[in-house]
Image (cartoon, helix red, strand yellow):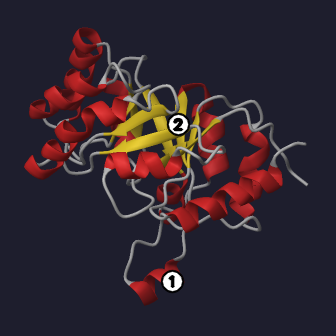
Amino acid sequence: MQTYTGSSILSVPSWVIPGSYAENLRFLECKKEIKGVELLFFIYDDETKNVLDSEWEKIQNFRERFVFTAHLPELLQPAHEGLVALLAPLVRHFVVHPAAQSYMEQARLLAEWTKYLGASFLVENIKAGLLEALLPHLEKSVGICMDTGHLLVDGQNPAEFFARYRERIGEIHLHSVDKEQAAIDGKLPDHRQLRRDESWLLELIPLLDNYRGVINLEVFSWEEAKAGIEVLHFFRKP
C-alpha cells in the first residue's frame, strides 16, 4: 500500500458547520487532527467585514491553536489591501485566484503587498492555463496552491502537477470530483470528499512523503472533512 509520513499541516476551511468564523473555530478546537484553518473570504462585502470586525479578537484567541491561512476574494482588487493588512500578521499565507486577464496588474499588487505588508501569497490553479499565464509575471517569492479538484475537472493529473511544481507548492486543496452526484444535487462537481480507492489519489499519496506544507481538505461540511481525515489516516505510515 502507498503511504506517506503525514508531516504536513492538516487544515480545513472556516466553514465546516453553519455559523461564523468564531463558531467554526470553537467547533474545531477539540478536533486534535486539525492543525490549521483556512479563513474564507470568497466574497468580502460589508456583511463579511462586519462579522470579521466583530469577531476579530475571538479569532486571534486561536492563534496558538491553529495555523491560519486565508483565501482572498475571487476577483482581487486594490480595495482588498485593508483586508490583507489586517490578516497579514495572523496568517501563514494568502491564497489567490489568477485573474483571467490583467496578469501584470495582479502581479504588481502581489509584489506591493509582499513588500509593504510582509504578506506571503500562493496562486491557485483554477481553470487550465490561467496559472501558467500568470506565473511568468510573478516574483519567485509567490508560491502555488495546488487544487486537486480543479485539476481533475480539467482532466489533469494531480501527481504530475505536484511533481512539476513541488518546490513552489505551499498548500494543497485536497478534494475529489463526483460529476454524477453533481448532476443530482446541482452542486459543484469538485469539493467532494475523498475516496481512498481513487487512482489519482493512490498516485499522489507517495509524493506527499515529507511534504511540510498545508494540506487543506477543502470541503464544506464536517462530515466530508471527517471522511477525508479517515482516508489520510489510512495511508499514513505507522
Q: Position of residue 172 (x, y in %)?
A: 55, 42
Q: Pointer 1: what residue?
A: 181
The local secondary structure at tag 1 comes to helix
Task: Give the position of the C terminus as an image quadrant.
Answer: top right
Of 178 and 40, nearer the camera is 40
Of 230 and 2, nearer the camera is 230
Q: Residue at x 56, y 56 (%)?
A: 156
Residue type (three-letter) at the residue carrying disc 2: Glu
Q: Position of residue 84 (x, y in %)?
A: 24, 27
Residue 80 occupies which quadrant of the picture?
top left
Q: Residue at x 58, y 37 (%)?
A: 35
How crowded is the residue under tag 1: few (<14 C-alpha within 10 Å), some, or many (20+)? few
The local secondary structure at tag 2 comes to strand
Q: Taking 218 as reference, is 86 left or right?
A: left
Most extreme residue toward the bottom is 184
Task: Give the position of the N terminus as an image quadrant.
Answer: bottom right
Q: Is residue 102 above or below residue 234?
A: above
Q: Is residue 55 above or below residue 105?
A: below
Q: Residue at x 38, y 41 (%)?
A: 131
State the separation of the CA atoms marked 1 and 2.
27 Å
| Res. 132 visible in picture | no
Residue 57 occupies which quadrant of the picture?
top left
Q: Residue at x 48, y 63 (%)?
A: 191
Q: Pointer 2: what residue?
A: 171
Q: Position of residue 133 (x, y in %)?
A: 34, 38
Mark 1 in CB contact with mark 2 (< 8 angstroms): no
